[in-house]
């Protein structure tokens, strides 16, 4: 299936697709996208905070789904909507030749692909496997090698934008893998995101994402500290946020995802920090470049959970 949708791009440089187009072009692109779409079932593994709205956007575009999640309750609303729910990643691979995985950690991704009931147990030759988890780039590379041995295609396509963008279908996807398969991946990813960027070989999508994670962590800590300082010095938090957002300190953490309760609606700080991005999920590279995926599993399993950086301060 993936092999039938090939696109050969430039020999070098970054390939980029955006849904932000002039109305006429966007309308034509939408028609072309619908005509291209085979609408055969798409497997989706991991329907948590991010995976749930992503899968729903695929449904909105007419794709029937084969769903699996380690927590059966997470699948109930998809079952009620008439989608197929199966009991393992292997069962997903048996029924679908295009699969998207959206999982929290490298350990979860390894288990979903290489575990006793993993995707690789029943994957079909020619299948396209897209991992939108944010994991260690080395793990992505190792998984790609295992997938290739089975005659299938693996691409890493982590996302940025958070739960809000997942719900609205405005995620940014950073894609790594064989460039000739980018069009096949784009057909699905464009249903869930407004930007789909080809970054290079397998692992480069993850590399771009962890760079973004690093910058986000720094800006969020800085925003939290600045807001906390201002509040302790007697400033109204909404006023302070307004000033920061019209000044040189403005950033995504201050104007879109402010960490202080009461400053804005629709963000985790307005909901007792529920639905936010845990600090433990920020750390994706574990050790030196030659560390094995097994070692990553051991170290991440033993890693102690980090306390919230924000909740205790406000």
Image (tube, rainbow, N blue to C red):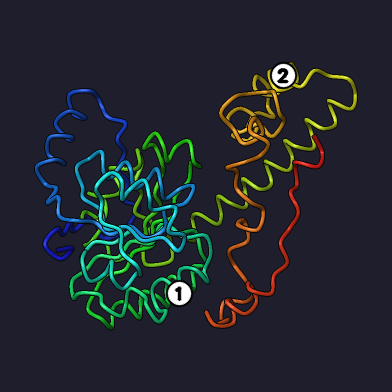
> To which residue does mark 1 refer?
111
The reply to whether the C-beta atoms of the residues labelled 1 and 2 are less than 8 Å apart is no
Within 10 Å of the Cα at label 2, are there few (<14), some (14-19), or many (20+) other Cα atoms?
Answer: some
Q: Which of 225/22 is in front? A: 225
* Residue shown at the point (27%, 58%) measured from the top left: 66
Specify the label residue 83 is tagged with.
none
In this view, the mark in front (1 or 2): 1
Q: Is residue 284 above or below residue 211?
A: below
Residue occupying the point 73% across, 58% down: 306
In the rendered image, residue 184, in percent from the top left (x then y), is placed at 21, 56
* Image coords of residue 182 (percent x, y): 25, 57
Q: Secondary structure at mark 1?
A: helix
Real-space Cα separation, disc 1 to disc 2, in angstroms: 44 Å
Decide if residue 142 is on the left or right side of residue 87.
right
Instruction: Give whichever of discs 1 and 2 has the lower sequence position.
Output: 1
| Secondary structure under the numbered disc 2 in the rendered image | helix
How crowded is the residue under tag 1: few (<14 C-alpha within 10 Å), some, or many (20+)?
Answer: some
From the viewer's perspective, is residue 272 above or below residue 13? Answer: above
Name the residue nearer the viewer: 14 or 3: 3
Q: Residue at x 66, y 34 (%)?
A: 269
Location of the C terminus (image quadrant) = top right
Q: Residue at x 14, y 48 (%)?
A: 37
Q: Position of residue 202 (x, y in %)?
A: 38, 67
**Quadrant showing the N terminus:** bottom left
Extreme right residue here? 233
Residue 241 placed where, x, y %? 70, 23
6 to 161, vertically: above or below: below
Q: How many marks?
A: 2
- Return the residue nearer the eye: 133 or 41: 41
Q: Which mark is residue 238?
A: 2
């Amino acid at each position: 299936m993936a092999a039938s949708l090939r696109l050969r791009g430039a020999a070098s440089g970054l390939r980029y697709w955006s849904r932000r187009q002039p109305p006429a072009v966007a309308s034509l692109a939408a028609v072309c996208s619908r005509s291209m779409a085979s609408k055969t079932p798409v497997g989706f593994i991991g329907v948590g905070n991010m995976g749930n709205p992503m899968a729903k956007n695929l449904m909105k575009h007419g794709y029937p789904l084969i769903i699996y999640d380690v927590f059966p309750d997470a699948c109930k609303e998809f079952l009620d909507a008439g989608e197929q729910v199966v009991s393992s990643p292997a069962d997903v691979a048996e029924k679908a030749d295009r699969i998207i995985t959206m999982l929290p950690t490298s350990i979860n991704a390894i288990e979903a692909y290489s575990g006793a009931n993993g995707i690789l147990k029943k994957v079909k030759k020619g299948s396209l496997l897209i991992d939108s988890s944010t994991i260690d780039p080395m793990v992505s590379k190792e998984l790609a090698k295992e997938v290739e041995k089975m005659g299938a295609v693996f691409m890493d396509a982590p996302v940025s934008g958070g739960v809000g963008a997942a719900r609205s279908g405005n995620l940014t996807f950073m894609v790594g893998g064989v460039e000739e398969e980018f069009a096949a991946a784009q057909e699905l990813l464009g249903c869930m995101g407004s930007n789909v960027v080809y970054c290079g070989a397998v692992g480069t999508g993850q590399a771009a994402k962890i760079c973004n994670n690093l910058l986000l962590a720094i800006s969020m800590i800085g925003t939290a500290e600045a807001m906390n300082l201002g509040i302790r010095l007697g400033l109204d938090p909404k006023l302070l946020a307004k000033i920061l957002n019209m000044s040189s300190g403005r950033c995504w953490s201050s104007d879109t995802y402010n960490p202080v309760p009461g400053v804005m609606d629709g963000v985790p700080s307005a909901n007792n920090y529920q639905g936010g991005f845990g600090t433990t999920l920020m750390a994706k590279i574990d050790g030196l470049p030659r560390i094995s995926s097994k070692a990553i599993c051991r170290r991440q399993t033993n890693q102690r959970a980090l306390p919230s950086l924000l909740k205790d301060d406000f």
